Image: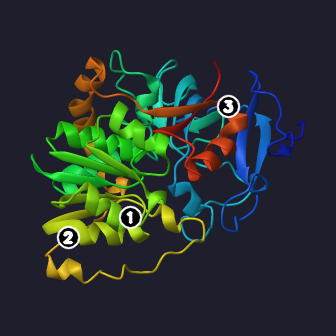
Amino acid sequence: MSPTPCPRRSFLPNVLAMTTNHTAHAVHQVARPTGFPAATDFAYVETPVPSPAPGTALVENLLLSVDPYHRGLMDGGEGGFELNTPLEGRAVGRVIASRDPGLREGDLVFHREGWRTHALVTLGANGTRRLRGHAGVPLEAYLGILGGTGLTAYAALTRTAALREGEDVFVSAAAGGVGTATGHIARLLGARRIIGSAGSAAKVRHLTDVLGWDAAFDYHDGPVGEQLAQAAPDGIDVYVDNVGGDHLAGAIDVLREYGRIAWVGGISMYNGDRSPAAPRNLFEIVHKSLRLEGVLVRNHTNLQDELEDFLVPHLGSGRVGTDSTVVQGIDRTVDAFLGMLGGNNVGKMLVRLGE
């Protein structure tokens, strides 16, 4: 028996050529980041394309997702990423060989074995599912507004915050994937005013001029609480928080009595830049009878079909867009990830593989 070929490794950004029919490429994490991750915390690894064992299917990935939650998992610990193994993430791919009776060659699937060109999956395991393949819906939507990003926004608004028609909503990191999805869904649910914060004047203009938000501000332009109070002088009912820190404190000040906070993420705390453990005004939650609840998308996977039934007609009509920034090539996955952490994307940051 011939020996198993050893993986060949090169550190980013000096990567090798794109995948061939016989070579699989993957991104490994090789070091724990200190603060903001660096390209040298990752490596690009080549292996032979695997063959499916009984009960599995081989998928050639078409689109990969890079997400803020990856940063926390890179620190290791319970549930974190292991070093020197392919990183995991949401992906969409096409089955090219199958020994899983539930999957056929040519099927498009969603799975969580991303950050690589090829993956072995099993239908129903680790979130693997066949895509419903809605006519007129671009593939990017299945990792954006119809994927975990949109599902997070939908669960935050319909379950956690229980948004009602005529209410006012504030969204932080509003020009990102979850932020733009939240705006679309809030509008469809009948929100009266939608207000967002973003990290540049260009993103603010995108929110108001392109996506039709009622107000937006650049959080670099002054204290968040003061800018939010100017944008929402009569208060807000719901806050979808992707940032934490001063955004959460500002929203607590502006929320009306019985307001709700759906806390999705804490970008302000992801890279070692720790905000205070609790906002200075946290006790206002008691004074105003506010409700604050965390949102974990894995607790809401039962809403996937409901989300698609709700959104697909609007995607087909053009009322809702996919709102994505797409980079090309497995060799730019880390660039895309670092760019997303640095706020270089508008909408969902994705990596396209192949043509």
Residue 232 vs residue 118, the one in the foreground = 232
The vertical placement of 41 against 350, above or below, is below
Q: Quadrant of residue 279?
A: bottom left
Q: CA distance from mark 3 to mark 1?
A: 53 Å
Q: Which mark is residue 224?
A: 1
Identify the mark at residue 291; answer none if there is no mark. 2
Q: Determine whether label 2 and label 3 are within 8 Å by CB.
A: no
Q: Secondary structure at mark 2?
A: strand
Secondary structure of residue under mark 3: loop
Residue type at mark 3? Ser
Amino acid type, callout 2:
Arg
Q: Which residue is mark 3?
A: 51
Q: Residues within 10 Å of mark 2 (few under 14, many from 20)?
A: some
Please say whether residue 142 is visible from this viewpoint.
yes
Q: Which of 355/6 is in front?
A: 355
Q: Secondary structure at mark 1?
A: helix
User: Going by the image, does 275 lie left or right of 342?
Assistant: left
Image marks 3 and 1: residues in contact by CB distance under 8 Å: no
